[in-house]
Amino acid sequence: MKTLKLTLSKAPFEVMVTGEKKEEFREGGSWIRSRLFNKDDTEREYDLIEFTNGYGAHRPSFTCKFDGFVECYMNVATREYSNGLKVEGIGKGDFVILCGEVTEIRNYN
């Protein structure tokens, strides 16, 4: 199975591990493009996404199904979540990664 690996800060991690937040927003740029597209500009295929909260050996993480992604061609409405996280400023050229069912949670209380 092919897994896309991404790091999250605490606030997004908290609402994604529960399944409340089902979209991960990433600013367009060469790094994320290299994860989502092959060198010939075809989309990479993934089965899962592994999200980790920060860096280090015992960091919390979870895996969910990869439901694809879209590249924004206009501004995305502001999103607000139960823990106070507010996502805004996503616009043209940025990416929305679609997260499916959480399949595994590690080192998270």
Image (cartoon, rainbow, N blue to C red):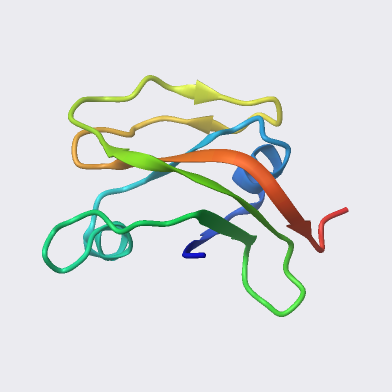
Please name whichever residue, 58 or 67, is drawn nearer the observer in this view of the structure. Answer: 67
- Residue 32 vs 98, above or below: the answer is below
Please name whichever residue, 80 or 67, is drawn nearer the observer in this view of the structure. Answer: 67
Q: Name the residue: 11% across, 65% down.
A: 40
Residue 38 location in percent, x, y? 21, 65
Residue 3 location in percent, x, y? 50, 63
**From this viewpoint, is residue 96 visible?**
no
Q: Name the residue: 53% across, 30% down.
A: 86
Q: Residue furthest bottom?
A: 57
Q: Residue furthest top?
A: 77
Left-right relation of 77 to 22: left
Q: Name the residue: 13% across, 58% down.
A: 41
**From this viewpoint, is residue 51 visible?**
yes
Q: Residue furthest front?
A: 1
Residue 37 location in percent, x, y? 24, 59
Left-right relation of 70 to 40: right
Residue 81 location in percent, x, y? 62, 26
